[in-house]
Image: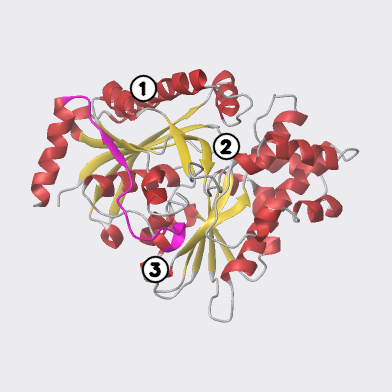
Amino acid sequence: MDKQLGIGLMSGTSLDGIDAVLIEIEGSSVNTKVKVIDSLTHEYESDVRHALKELCFPETASLEKICSMNMFLGRELGMLVNKLLDKASIGKEEVLFVSSHGQTIFHKPLGGEKRMDVPGTLQIGDLSMLSEITGITAVGDFRTADMSAGGQGAPLVSFVDYILFNNPYRSRAIQNIGGIGNVTYIPRNAQKDQVMSFDTGPGNMVIDEIVYRITESKQVYDKDGEIASKGNVNQKLLNKLMEHPYLKLRPPKTTGRELFGNSFVDSVMSNSSGLPSEDIVATVTAWTAKTIADSYSRFIESPSNSIDDVVIGGGGSYNPFLMEQLRRYLPNKTVYKHEDFQLSSNLKEAIAFAILGYHCLIGKSNQIPSATGAENPVIMGKISHTQPQAFQQLSALRGNLH
């Protein structure tokens, strides 16, 4: 199969912006090979970030706002793709696909007792708008296929972690710290069905919201962990945070802003009244690290399972205070960053969704049931091509597969 050019787009639960990466890709599953050609990041303006945050909560969301933002984000994603192509001096006719995770505004991994109260998830950023703006086949809405097969629709990147980090001699925990933290555990010389993955709990989400509040919206995150490094970890507050019920739930499990959003931060602030702001930030940062270490000891490590390497990715890997806390809580582990494996922590998830999108287009399953809880492997993703040229490119690819 010939090498193809594709673009991956990622907008995470941190609501900080969109990462776009142009890649060259060939092969499939463990034989997948990826080369990064170029990349671009677009930070959300404050009004867009605020509007997106409103959509994540039933009390501030509305059907009209969701409909409008779905199309607006599709257009924003498309315009970013066009800027990336201009930057790389690549014509759209050279690119086979653009693959978008979309912006999650609600994720409900478990159903209720009523007949119509079934699990579901909603990512916005319309694929038809994305395809029309770029003139390229668009792939997205990955989670729903996994949930249709009984999975929780997350974590999805475990499929890519297995491709990139499986090792015959080392057991690895691949830990992403975005808005939410999630881990993929890959035993040494693992088969796919031995891979385990779940959301460990909060990543940067709680830290970011507290920094936003204490700086009166002047900062949206703790750059380089500067605020946390000036404070002290308050053990009483940390112990209280570690009592959260989610942390005791057994995998497979996923979470998001529904559990660790504004209402949760309200309770953190009320439980920390009288503490210096720096101490609050230091404590919730240490909490993220401790939830990760606690998840490993509770759910992964056993007499038959060990962790040799911990590989940290996502925005949290650029926070020195958080990395220091991780090493403190994981004293017997070698803690790496994605950069130690020649992979950008910032771009990892955008690359991952490019890989997932490509597998969808070539008709290959692109999720790991043991990670998501699904009953069987599925091909995740929906495809949109609004222009004949994009359809013809995809048809030519599929013709070459037979």
Where is mark 2, residue-wise? 14
Mark 1 is surrounded, within 10 Å at the Cα level, by few (under 14), some (14 to 19) or many (20 or more) other residues, namely some
Mark-to-mark CA distance, 2 and 1: 21 Å
Extreme front residue here? 115
Q: From what the image shows, is residue 293 above or below residue 104? A: below
Callout 1 amino acid: Met
Q: Vertical placement of 284 versus 87: above or below?
A: below
Instruction: Residue at 68%, 28% (x, y): give it.
Output: 219
Secondary structure at numbered mark 3: helix
The part of the chain drawn in magenta is: 370-387
Q: Nearer the viewer, mark 2 or mark 1?
A: 2
Q: The disc labelled 2 sits on which kind of residue?
A: Ser
User: In the rendered image, which residue does mark 1 sit on?
Assistant: 79
**Would you name the residue on which mark 3 appears?**
193
Q: Residue furthest right?
A: 274
Per the image, label 2 sits on a secondary structure element best described as loop
Is residue 274 something that shows in the picture?
yes
Magenta region includes residue 308? no
Mark 1 or mark 3: whose residue is earlier in sequence:
1
Instruction: Report whether 127 appears left or right of 230.
Output: left
Q: Amino acid at mark 3?
A: Asp
* Mark identifier at residue 56: none
| Residue 97: image location, x then y, percent | 25, 37
Q: Could you tell me residue 324's position as x and y percent?
A: 68, 55
Predominant secondary structure, magenta span:
loop
Is residue 371 highlighted in magenta? yes
Q: Earlier in the sequence, mark 2 or mark 1?
A: 2
